[in-house]
Image (cartoon, grey):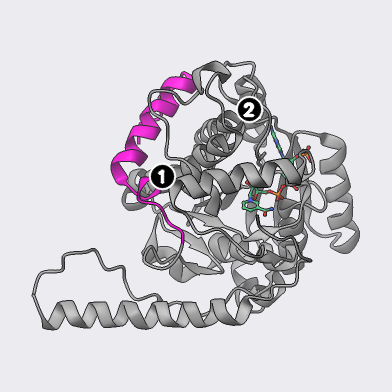
């Protein structure tokens, strides 16, 4: 069983070494293939060294030093913005770079107000707006999108960060009849994103960010049983894994459908492991062994120690994904530690990076939300 320790980031040096080794290995592979066999047998991604280099210890404030100019004046929508959560820390951090409008989409308006108050106190010039958004109800999602679309003084949205989420909850069907983690983490965001798409596409460089997780390793999309037989075969960790796989696939599908035609970029990411209230609802002594058992059955690495990050480090990849301009050439990628993930050395499962799975999920999601979005 994994040992819990305080969020100190003790593995940072070895992870950095791993990262450097991964880049070196990638360069070696490229050279070997070019020199040896002419045709590459595996797809080699463009060299990530052309991007600015950050690491697992990079904080949101560190990134502001490079990206403030990209944030200033932008209109940004973020879901799940409760103080102390990653979304809350993200909006408070980017507020320091003077965006034009911060739209806080939260299911509890009092909590969104508390975040808005904190931002307004520190940065009175920013236009901070709240919208009530319960991702677990399609009717509520439609209402939130209609509110945003009705703001005629805000004709475009530059960045949408689909951050809100729940993890490892007991089995529940939403009012629309779908397993709650799949519905709240994916279907709600799918509908919300597409309903405000006209405003996104009115931006010069629209970007969508999906907050996924390394936990996507726990399950592909369960095509014939996404609802876990209405609870009979429910596994809270497989359900979380399925929803986080969906977050990655949705960004890949957005990049494919709207990248070349409309200049939209979309990136998903793993923020790291951060002590937030995501885990507050369950008993760790039960939930963690359950996850470990699933990881063992899948043949995954079992951590000796949880590599905790502080929230300030946890939101760095949010900021990188949302604002790093040179990511434009890497549309649809899955990021971590403020860099593109390496499927050879990082936890990146093929079921989350398959274009066929991405297209299938788009079509299934259209069916489940009851509306087609053809781009
Ligand atoms: N923390 C980690 O270690 C970790 C690791 C990997 C990925 N992530 C991902 O990071 C994202 C943020 O998580 P967090 O750690 O910041 O968790 P958190 O502290 O629990 O925050 C989650 C946020 O989502 C909101 N939310 C939950 N259900 C919602 C719904 N149905 N409709 C609208 N908003 C809803 C919450 O609102 P309320 O306050 O009203 O509940 C809260 O603002 C999630 O997508 C999570 O899967 C986190």
The spot of residue 88 in percent (x, y) is 76, 53
Quarter residue 131 falls in? top right
Q: Is mark 2 within 8 Å of ligand 1?
A: no
Relative to 353, residue 133 above or below: above
Query: What is the crowding at mark 1: few (fewer than 14 residues within 10 Å), some, or many (at least 20)?
Result: many
Report the residue marked by disc 2. Answer: 141
Relative to 234, residue 158 above or below: below
Q: Is residue 228 highlighted in magenta?
A: no
Q: Is residue 370 highlighted in magenta?
A: yes
Q: Secondary structure at mark 1?
A: helix
Q: Locate the N terminus and report the quarter of the image it occupies.
A: bottom right
Horizontally, residue 297 falls left or right of residue 146, namely left
Q: Quadrant of ligand 1?
A: top right
Instruction: Decide which of 6, 205 is in the foreground and name it.
Output: 6
Q: Considering the whole magenta stretch, tell me its main secondary structure.
A: helix
Looking at the image, tell me whether mark 1 or mark 2 is earlier in sequence order: 2
What residue sits 45% from the left and 71% below the top? 326
Horizontally, residue 103 falls left or right of residue 257, namely right
Quarter residue 359 falls in? top left
What residue sits 24% from the left and 63% below the top? 43
Instruction: Decide which of 327, 40 is in the foreground and name it.
Output: 40
What residue sits 79% from the left and 66% below the top? 6
The spot of residue 104 in percent (x, y) is 73, 45
Instruction: Decide which of 320, 185 is in the foreground and name it.
Output: 185
The spot of residue 79 in percent (x, y) is 67, 43
Report the residue marked by disc 1. Answer: 254
Q: CB atoms at circles 1 and 2 under 8 Å apart?
A: no
Q: Is mark 1 within 8 Å of ligand 1?
A: no
The spot of residue 24 in percent (x, y) is 36, 83
Query: Over which residues does the magenta segment extend?
Result: 347-375
Instruction: Decide which of 181, 87 is in the foreground and name it.
Output: 181
What residue sits 47% from the left and 21% below the top? 368
């Amino acid at each position: 069983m994994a040992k819990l320790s305080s969020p100190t980031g003790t593995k940072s040096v070895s992870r950095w070494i791993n990262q450097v080794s991964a880049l070196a290995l990638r360069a070696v592979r490229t050279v070997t293939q070019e020199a040896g066999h002419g045709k590459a047998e595996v797809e080699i991604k463009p060299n990530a060294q052309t991007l600015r280099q950050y690491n697992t210890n990079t904080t949101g404030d560190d990134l502001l030093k490079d990206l403030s100019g990209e944030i200033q004046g932008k209109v940004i929508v973020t879901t799940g913005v409760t103080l102390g959560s990653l979304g809350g820390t993200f909006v408070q951090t980017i507020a320091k770079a003077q965006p034009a409008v911060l739209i806080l989409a939260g299911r509890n308006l009092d909590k969104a107000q508390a975040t808005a108050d904190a931002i307004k106190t520190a940065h009175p010039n920013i236009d901070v707006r709240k919208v009530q958004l319960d991702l677990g109800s399609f009717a509520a999602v439609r209402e939130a999108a209609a509110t945003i679309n009705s703001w005629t003084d805000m004709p475009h949205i530059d960045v949408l960060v689909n951050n809100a989420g729940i993890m490892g909850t007991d089995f529940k069907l939403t009012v629309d009849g779908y397993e709650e983690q799949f519905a709240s983490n994916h279907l709600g965001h799918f509908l919300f994103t597409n309903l405000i798409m006209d405003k996104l596409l009115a931006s010069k460089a629209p970007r969508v960010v999906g907050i996924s997780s390394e936990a996507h390793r726990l399950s592909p999309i369960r095509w014939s049983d996404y609802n876990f037989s209405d609870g009979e075969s429910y596994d809270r960790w497989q359900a979380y894994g399925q929803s986080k796989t969906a977050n990655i696939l949705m960004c890949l599908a957005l990049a494919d459908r709207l990248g070349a035609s409309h200049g939209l970029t979309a990136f998903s990411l793993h923020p790291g492991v951060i002590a937030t209230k995501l885990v507050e609802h369950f008993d760790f002594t039960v939930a963690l062994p359950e996850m470990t058992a699933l990881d063992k059955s899948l043949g995954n690495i079992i951590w000796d120690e949880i590599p905790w990050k502080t929230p300030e480090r946890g939101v760095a990849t949010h900021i990188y994904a949302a604002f790093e301009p040179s990511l434009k050439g890497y549309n649809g990628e899955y990021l971590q530690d403020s860099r593109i993930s390496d499927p050879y050395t990082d936890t990146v499962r093929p079921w989350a990076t398959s274009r066929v799975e991405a297209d299938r999920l788009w079509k299934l999601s259209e069916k489940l939300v009851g509306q087609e979005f053809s781009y």
